[in-house]
Amino acid sequence: MRWLILSAMTTLSLLIYAVTLHASYRTLRQQLLEQALDANQASASQLAQSTDTLLEAAQAQLAYSANLLATGQAHPGEESERLGRQTGTFASSWVVQADGRVLAGTPPKPASADTSKGTAESEAVMERRQPLIKVIDMPANDDPSIVVTRPIQTPDGRYQGRIGGTVAGSSLFHARPEERVATHVYLLDRAGRPLHPHGANFPAEALAEAARRGLSGSGALTDAQGTGWLAGYAPLRSAGLSIAILQPADAALEPLSGLMLRTLGRTLPFVLLVLMASVWLGGWIVRPLKQLAVTEHWESTIARERIEQVRTGYFEAEQLRQAMLEGLGRLHRRLRKLNRESITDPLTGLTNRRGKRLALSEWEAQQRPFAVIVIDIDHFKQVNDTHGHEVGDQVIQFAGQLMRRVSRSDDLLCRVGGEEFMMLLPDTSLETAAQVAERLRRCFAQEPSPTGEPISISAGVACWHGGGSLSSALTRADEALYQAKRSGRNRIVAGEPS
Ligand SMILES: Nc1nc2c(ncn2[C@@H]2O[C@H](COP(=O)(O)OP(=O)(O)OP(=O)(O)O)[C@@H](O)[C@H]2O)c(=O)[nH]1
């Protein structure tokens, strides 16, 4: 039972522990993913905001220079050089006149001087002679560059050309907030296509709608290879683009195993404690039950004493103990009754032959001296013949009553045959026993029996002094009785002392 309780509690504890660990794992995982998504979105928004500020500042600087050039307050070469030197915003700058000819540039021959041309959209902007911000196609590993241009128009509205510059990605993304584990920054066009870096391998289409609508937010994506990505995105309003910050989900979940190990380390001692408590509890529950499981000495008082000494400790075991004591009490009472019945003559209530034999064995073992009176009703056959067996039985019962009348409480009164009786008087001399026998004989002679008249008895008396043969003492009593019968009945004969 102990092992049953132990294994049940162990299984239950481990099951609860496993479920708790699993739930912790799921919660931690979810928390890490949500934190990463929030962080990526915050980074994307911050980066977009700082880039927007930078590009707006670049536009303002170009507007100032365009105004100086349009009003003839500055020379194109000087202004282009001043832009590069003074602000530090531009990696290169140039001035082109209305027909597209480069008037000045810093560096002197900027490779991207004509990069303000390109897409149909940007051409249209140029045609409309509006300011433009545009990402230049760059080699895959380079930082992106953004071209910012501004029309040069005289106060009366004549278009004289454009002034522009490139803002390098290094200065764009230097404002990037904290560099987080395995994060990648992407510039997306309005269709959500990655403009930079080239060949970006992520499920861009998932961000297309957000990019088109200029939304900011975050989401978990899965690419064609089944890799999970955590994306945060925000619109780069000044350039009509979006910035996305992506992080592989695995990288965000990297701390998970460490956290779970720490959780295990912290909780395992408690689990061991629970298991140890289970062992102790199992023992505590089983101990009184084990002690109550008495398998021997049920018939003696030892069992009762052992059960009484059991300290139960809890209600159910105490109930069981009480029930066992109650059952044991009943068993003992029943055994006593059976024992009594097995040594009692049912007609007279006197001790029967078996009881007599047991008592004699005990006295012999104890060497306890006793006197014996063997009694026989005279002519009992005639009683039966004359008055019937029923009256004969009543006479036998009557004989028992008279024997009780003349005896002491210590004396053992037995019915040893049909109308034969025996009185065993412990620690009694031959003379005293003979006197008792004589008193009994007189009782019979004087008291009317169930026949309506007194009846007579004959008796033989002998005694055993605690040594020698006990059976010879009994034989002497029998011989004395025989002698009393032969001498005419209704008399007592004491045998020879041993
Ligand atoms: N009613 C009745 N009679 C019994 C019982 N046991 C024995 N008897 C009868 O007791 C009688 C004993 O008779 P006997 O042994 O001849 O002895 P007796 O007639 O007493 O003659 P003596 O002993 O020589 O004086 C028999 O008739 C038995 O049937 C009993 O339990 N009830």
Image (cartoon, rainbow, N blue to C red):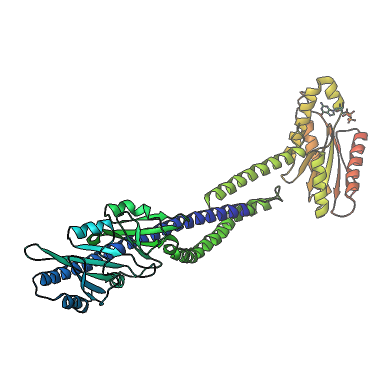
Rendered view: 354 above or below 314: above
> Left or right: where does residue 358 sit relative to residue 19?
right
> Left or right: where does residue 154 sit relative to residue 363?
left
> Left or right: where does residue 286 sit relative to residue 154?
right
Rendered view: 409 above or below 175: above
Counting from the top left corner in percent of width and height, residue 282 is at 58, 56
Rendered view: 309 above or below 68: above
Q: Quadrant of ligand 1?
A: top right
Q: In this view of the protein, which residue sits in the foreground, 328 or 336? A: 328
Q: Residue at x 81, y 42 (%)?
A: 356
Quadrant position of residue 381: top right
> Left or right: where does residue 320 sit relative to residue 497?
left
Q: In this view of the protein, which residue sits in the foreground, 20 or 324? A: 20
Q: How many numbered tags mark residues here? A: 0
Q: In this view of the protein, which residue sits in the foreground, 43 or 307? A: 43
Quadrant position of residue 79: bottom left
Identity of the residue furthest to the left in this view: 156
Counting from the top left corner in percent of width and height, residue 30 is at 40, 57
Rendered view: 52 above or below 334: below
Answer whether residue 423 is visible to the viewer in this image: no
Counting from the top left corner in percent of width and height, residue 407 is at 74, 42
Q: Residue at x 40, y 61 (%)?
A: 200
Answer whether residue 403 is visible to the viewer in this image: yes
Q: Residue at x 14, y 72 (%)?
A: 65
Q: In this view of the protein, which residue sits in the foreground, 489 or 336? A: 336
Counting from the top left corner in percent of width and height, residue 215 is at 27, 54
